[in-house]
Amino acid sequence: MGWQDHCDAPKPGTLLCRIDAVPDGACKELTYGQGDSAFRLLLYRRAERVCAFVNCCPHFSLPLNARPDEFLLLSDSRIMCAHHSAVFRLEDGRCLDGPARGLDLEAVTVSIMDGLIYMGQR
Amino acid sequence: MTTQTIMQPDVQASSASNRTGYRGFTLGSFNFTRDEYFVRVTWPGQGQQMSHTMSADAFLRAMMRDVAWGFFYGWVNFDAVIGTRNLYGKVELYAGRYHPAYHDKGLDLTETFDSPQIMATFKAILEDWTNEGFDPFAAPDETGKDWLGNKHGSNRAAIERERQACRRMPGLAGDAPLRSDANGYPVNRAFADVPQDEPEIHAEPGFENEVHAFSLFAYLSRSDVTWNPSVSSVCGRSLCCPTTEEYILPIKHGNDRVEWFVQLSDEIEWEIEDKNTGAPRAKVRMKAGDVAAMPADIRHQGYSRKRSMLLVWENATPGLPEMYESGQLKPYPIEF
């Protein structure tokens, strides 16, 4: 079961947001659907590159942030889960440290065209 | 939009002691030192230098859990005096806050740190103070007495061992593997009589990839650590976290939600205390098949004289601590 099976996940080609809505070197969360079962998409921007993941730490299946758009960013493009301190590399979602080692963030393909971020390849 | 800054943890450590070889550490107003037998934590209180002493092995076992669990849910009391509270992004470190003798006299101290800062400091302490040959995750019968004495070597392999978790269930394609001799999980000495056969799955055609099962007893018989709940099934916010227990739970866990315990084998005795004062509230002796709900307003510590199997059932619903703290939810799940 992957993120594509989530009923609220945006379809390929869906416009997500403008690239400048994601500050350089920071994360932004986009939510699709309602309530606790909503699809939560995490975007991370480094210069003109954007990486996307399902915002779900594979340790306890919780979002990486405990409060809206508050992320624990570390040097070298790493992020720490606010709940139980698992550390992930934002370039590829690899878990580097903490209780989720061996389980990585689930990557989502996005693409950029004319300063806009889209779901999937375009 | 919330501004996000890159955190740079900065571990404050002294040089190694000429006498013992151990380094001292500072985190905010707290100081941590250790010698041959003891760990000493100091903090300022009413113009005095307060101090608290723990046996180094008990301290290391407690800190191992706090680091491995990433500060877990709620409070991780190393003992009746010092501990941490997870604020999910930040962590409180306290001394005496939940001990009336300190708190009522204003001699307690609580300071709040960004999670990366306190985690980096705790990991540095754990690495420096864990000697070669001592495994703070292991039962006393399965590790040596190398926790004591002057510094000799280290044991990174033990303190940084991979903690097991899963996305849905171990053994599913793309998920965590089941434990076996081949991947480094032999049957524990206490569970040599546990059958190792796995269930047969006969799914209706078309459902072959939607049904999964494994023997939880066999899985647990191969646990290499004690008192370390690991996620073994995920269904929405419902997390089953079984674990094997031997000797004493090295911390007193203060709940910020209800936790359900299902005793799967043997026996554990639990001491239940008021979360804020430590006043005794109950003793619970759980035998195989017993089920208990640990309320959201207590702290608990378990004693298992023989290695036993326990299923901890966690509710990972975000916002639960606030719902209990506000009184929206009662601290216990049922009323008699």
Image (cartoon, helix red, strand yellow):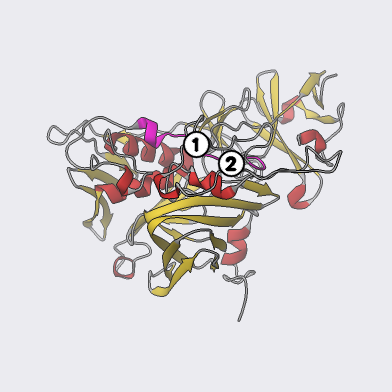
Mark number displayed over residue A59: 2
Could you tell me residue B137's position as x and y percent?
Answer: 38, 44
Could you tell me residue B278's position as x and y percent?
Answer: 38, 69
The answer to whether residue B64 is above or below residue B278 is above
Could you tell me residue A51's position as x and y percent?
Answer: 69, 25
Is residue B84 something that shows in the picture? Answer: no
Local packing at callout 1 (Cα closer than 10 Å; few below 14, some 14-19, many 20+) is many
* Rendered residue at 24%/38% (across/down): B24
The answer to whether residue B73 is above or below residue A82 is below
Could you tell me residue B183's position as x and y percent?
Answer: 51, 30
Q: Are marks 1 and 2 in contact (CB under 8 Å)?
A: yes
* Kind of element beneath mark 2: loop
Tell me the amino acid under the disc marked 2: His
Residue A104 figure quarter: top right
Q: Which residue carries the number 1 mark?
A: A98
* Rendered residue at 32%/35% (across/down): B12
Q: Principal SS element in the magenta part? A: loop
Give the quadrant of the N terminus of chain B: top right
* Kind of element beneath mark 1: loop
Is residue A11 something that shows in the picture? Answer: yes
First along the sequence among labels 1 and 2: 2
B160 drawn magenta? yes
B306 drawn magenta? no
Bounds of the magenta segment: B156-169
Q: Nearer the viewer, residue A55 or B303?
A: B303
Q: Are marks 1 and 2 on the same chain?
A: yes
Q: Nearer the viewer, residue B260 or B56?
A: B260
